[in-house]
Image: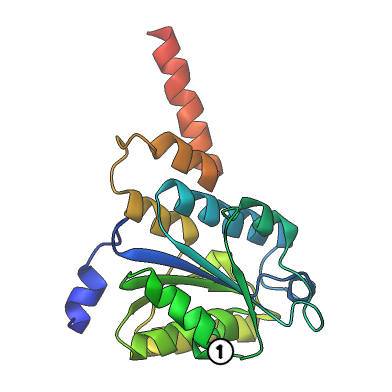
Amino acid sequence: MSETSKFQETLTKENAAVVLVDHQVGLYSGVRDIGLLELKHNVTGMAKAAQLLDVPTVATTTAADSMWGPMIPELAEVLPKDAEVIDRTSVNAWHDDGVREQIKATGRKKLIFAGVSLEVCATMPAIAAAAEGHDTYVALDACGTFWQAKREAGIARAQQAGVIVSDYGTLMVEIMGDNAAPEAGEVYGALDMSFATLLGQISSAYGDDG
């Protein structure tokens, strides 16, 4: 795919997958560039919306039994019940055979990454997957890191490598594609964006009055 078409082609239910990397208790304890409640809200909202849209989700941790601890419970609770969370030792998730094979098994060309930390756990595998022919994205507000300079470096490196940087809500509604879709209400509910909730309440109020 040409660089031009990569940036122009829309994310869909048929071509996208989500990859969640190292959203772990120990790593969250050091996050400083985004509020922890906001980060948990965003990544769990993205995971729930992905399920509603039938978008495959691959999840992985690093040294969950020792160095970085388990996946945050808020995310573990919303993943599919049969989801296999792959624990690995490699710094770059794409370099783990099990993770890479599970991602490739989805058959999806476009991969949305979110991780802690942003510049390592999201950016590095996104760049590596792009080098193997995938179109890759980073959901910036579903990632966290340990200080602002690392955030800025991660964004710059991702963009220099041709990774598309966006936010969790935009990526999911792009996949949904149509506000008249049967699942639209549930998707917006899963994303739990305050302005969307308010608009829904206003629309309902006017509808009731009518």
* Viewer-nearest residue: 23 or 32: 23
Q: Is residue 31 visible?
A: yes
Q: Bin the neighbour count of mark 1 within 10 Å (Cα to Cα): few under 14, some 14-19, many 20 and up.
A: some
* Viewer-nearest residue: 98 or 131: 98
| Quadrant hosting residue 178 | top left
Q: Is residue 123 visible?
A: no
Residue 11 placed where, x, y %?
30, 62
Residue 28 placed where, x, y %?
74, 71
Horizontal side of 74 relative to 115 (left or right) equals: right
Q: How many marks?
A: 1
Residue lying at the far front in this picture: please name it.
82
Q: Residue at x 70, y 55 (%)?
A: 74
As helix, strand or loop, the secondary structure at mark 1 comes to loop
Q: Residue at x 46, y 89 (%)?
A: 157
Q: Which scheme is used to colour this image of the protein?
A: rainbow
| Quadrant hosting residue 13 | bottom left
Q: Residue at x 67, y 72 (%)?
A: 33
Q: From the image, which quarter does the N terminus lie in?
A: bottom left
Residue 154 placed where, x, y %?
53, 85
Q: Which residue is mark 1?
A: 92
Q: Residue at x 59, y 66 (%)?
A: 84
In the image, residue 18 sits, relative to residue 161, either above or below, namely: above
In the image, residue 15 sits, relative to residue 207, either above or below, namely: below
* Viewer-nearest residue: 104 or 174: 104
Q: From the image, which quarter does the C terminus lie in?
A: top left
In the image, residue 194 sits, relative to residue 139, either above or below, namely: above
Residue 160 placed where, x, y %?
39, 89
Amino acid type shown at disc 1? Asn
Horizontal side of 157 relative to 131 (left or right) equals: right
| Quadrant hosting residue 108 | bottom left
